[in-house]
Every structure is written in C-alpha cells, then in structure tokens.
Image (cartoon, rainbow, N blue to C red):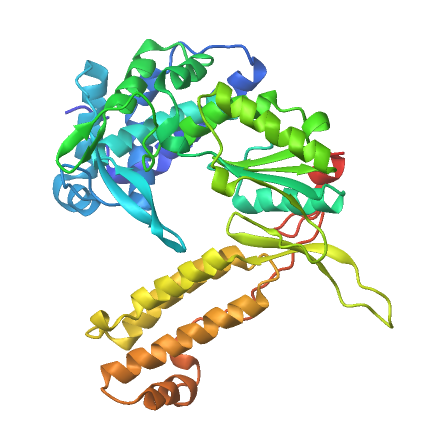
Amino acid sequence: MSAEVSASPTALVKTPLDKVRALQHTLYRTAKADPGRRFHALWDKVCRRDVLWRGWVAVRANNGAPGIDRTTLDQVEHEYGALRLVDELAAELREGRYRPLPARGVLIPKPGREDEYRPLSISTVRDRVVQAAMKIVLEPVFEADFLPCSFGFRPKRSAHDALQVVIDEAWRGRLWVVETDVANCFSAIPHDRLMAAIEERVADQSVLKLIRQMLRAGVMRDGQVRREVTGAAQGGPISPLLCNIYLHRIDRAWKEREHGVIVRFADDALVMCRTRQQAEAALARLRVLLAELGLEPKEAKTAVIHLEEDSPGMDFLGFHHRMVRSRGVRGNRGMLFLARWPADKAMQHAHDRIREITDRSRLLLSVETVVAELNVFLTGWAGYFRFGSSTSRFAVIREFTRMRMALFVAKKHKRSRGFGRWVVSYASPNHLGLNGLAGNVVAPRPFKDWRGKPNAGGERRR
C-alpha cells in the first residue's frame, strides 16, 4: 500500500485542506485574470484524494438522509470507513468506472405552507461526495464571473448581504419593487442550455461527461426511475452552483441604469426601481430574459409593489419589509424608513416546529432533552431573524414556546395546565433553561454592513 493511500484521516483533514484552498485560489485567480479562458485540465483535480476528502467533510457536516442504496453517513463513517470510500471513488474516477446512481425523490412541505411541497432529490452518499468534489473544483472558476447582484449559495455571501442592498436602495429612493420567483427553476433548466453555459468556461471533456451523467442519472419515485431532459435535481451539493451558472446569464444581461438594481438569491429575485414605469419595464425585461432561458416567473409570486407609508409591504428571504415612520419628537413627524421583521410564513414555520418538538408523542423523552432541542431550533431561528425590527415577534415565539412546554410538562406528569404553567414560570428560575430570545435584535441601518461594519461598497453605488 502506498504512503498516499495509507495516509491517516488526521493528515487528510489538516494539510490537504490547505492544499485544496490553494487550488481554489489558483483557479479563481486564473479565471479572473482571463475572462475568456476555457479550462482544459480539471479532471485530475476532481480525482484528487484530498479534494474528495474535502467533499466528504462537506457532505458529513451537512448531514442528510440516505439515497436509494439506504447507506447512511453513520454507516460510512463507523462501519465502511470514510477513507476507504474516498480511495475507492478516486480509483473509480481515474479508471472511468464511476457511474452515479439515481437520486431518491421525496416531497417536503414548504415552510409555513403545509399544502405546498418542494421536490427534493437525495443522492447516495458516494454520489454526494463526488458532487461536492466537482463543486470544489468548478466553483472558483465560475465565481470569477459571477456578479455582485447574486447572493444565493455563494461563498462569503449570505441572505443578509442581499437584505442590506434592499435597505440601501430603499434609502436612495428606489421604492418601486418588482418581486418574482422563477417557476420550478431547479426542475425546468434545460440540460443542453445548461451544458452550453458550463462549456463557456470548461473544455475538459471528462468533467463535462461526468456532469452530463449527473444530470441524466434520474430520480427514483414509487419504484420507477425518471430521466428528464430538464432540471438540476434540487438537493445535491452541486445543484445550487449549476443554478447560479445558468441564471448568471440574467445578471450579465441586466442594465442597472435602465431597469433598476436587481437582487438575486438563486431563483428568488427583487428589482429596486425609482418609478412605476421603470418597474414595469424591469418586469417586462425579466420575462424576456427568462423566456430566452426556457424559464418563466411564478405568477403567484410576481408583482410590482410601491414601498410607501401604509402600503402592505412585501416578503423577501423570510422577512416582511414595510415602510414605517419612527416616533416624532416634540410634535415633529418621525422619519420614514424601511423596517423588516419575520414574515407570517416564518412565524408559522416556527410555530409548527415548536409543536413538533413538544408533541405528546414525545412524552417519554425527558424535559431536559426537549428543552435542548427547542433551544437548538430557537438559537438558529433567532440568529437569522435578529437582524431586523423583530422584538415583538420574538416575544410571540417566546410566549408560545413557554406555553407549549407548560402543556408538555402537564401531560408528562398527568397534571393540569395550571401545574405546567407554574413549573415553567415560577418553579424554575430560568423557565427550564429555555432560550428567552432577549437582547438579540439588531436594527438594520443603510450603508452599514449588517455585521456592524461600514458598507463602503454600498456608498459607491449610485
């Protein structure tokens, strides 16, 4: 056995991660320096053991359910061996023996909408590792081309960065907003046009062949495998990157001076405009660009909105956005500004999740276990929504959580609701250790990074 194959997981975790980052930096710099360059030698990088190991680390950290082979991440890690899996995948890729399996198709309810479902494709663990390795190699090449208006599923960019642009542009007077969502984006992207977009930067035939195999692997539902000619199956590590590569064609065709400032988070988009006429022209332009890509907007989520006092506002990236007026001082009218707080759908999702965790079917669990699960959810939920005018809505979730825990305690001890409320509110000095969601709220400010730093980039835009 060679020294490379027998390397310990510790060695793979430490040194090669630095080598993988160096590889990504090199690819990014090379692509940035020559926007017209097509890369001919990427396959050897996808096959590298350190890249595949980094793919495994990313897949393991993301957790996830098993694919059609029913092999779980725990089984790979503790029984089969992650190092063994990486070695086998590296050999199969180099020798041309690797073939992706169909993904397992499931339907998951959309947050806050129990009557709507999102199709999800769950690939096998081994296929997810290969997809993650492919993403590691391709992402820096295309990141060199992606524009600042795109925020979804990109390194060092987040939903809060997109939300900050909305605040900045509203302050500049762009108060006519086009909101839209691409209908069935992940399942509607034509494979041939997607491959043409990828081939603008990638000329390595082995890489292109593997991407085609991933796209055509199909999805198994009800025991039958369906192989479509459209779609980048939502749920795989590489799917968001493929979506961004395809929708980048909208970004680069967009003319900000003519149609306003576009803010795109994957298939969800806003356009901030100064006038109704500009907003209507922007919507018409969006429809044309989407049609050229073989896509269309979701009509139920497409509208032109005027952000003004007493208007109904809009929802974007989980927040509800509305123009409100601050309190005046000594009889003066307060300042009009764009505020945001958790949207009704986000609140409904929180209520549903809290009910699920405190359901009576879990009465055999200890109170400490249930509180710990609640705190994990509440910490993540509040960590996202604390960047807004969310105090009152946090109070609603806090009281609902305590009420549900009071009911859980009462049922567990077969006592009255009053007993449960007494335990949560008075018998425990810290409400059983529940996250109080207090002191977390940070009000957004124009031209100031949501992390608290000055937003110099926002100041430069006009």
* Image label count: 0
In the rendered image, the quadrant that contains the N terminus is top left
Residue 26 visible in the snapshot? no
State left or right for residue 275 relative to residue 413: right
Position of residue 105 measured from the top left corner of the image (x, y, whole percent): 23, 38
Q: Residue at x 50, y 71 (%)?
A: 396
Residue in view at x 33 percent, y 50 percent: 109
Q: Is residue 410 above or below residue 87?
A: below
Residue at the spot x=70%, y=42% of the render? 169
Q: Position of residue 421 (x, y in %)?
A: 38, 86
Residue 4: quarter of image: top left
Residue 260 pos. (x, y %): 68, 32
**In the depicted view, which residue is nearer to us: 302 or 49?**
302
Look at the image and tell me in which quarter the C terminus lies. top right
In the picture shown, does residue 408 fall above or below 265?
A: below
Q: Answer with left or right where residue 415 lies relative to residue 188.
A: left
Query: Relative to 454, is 370 on the left or the right?
Result: left
Q: In the rendered image, is residue 102 in sight?
A: yes
Q: Is residue 173 left or right of residue 101?
A: right
The residue under the point 21% across, 70% down is: 361
Q: Relative to the observer, which residue lies in front, 377 or 28?
A: 377
Question: Which of the two residues, 130 or 262, is positioned nearer the viewer here?
Answer: 262
Residue 8's spot in the image, x, y percent? 24, 36
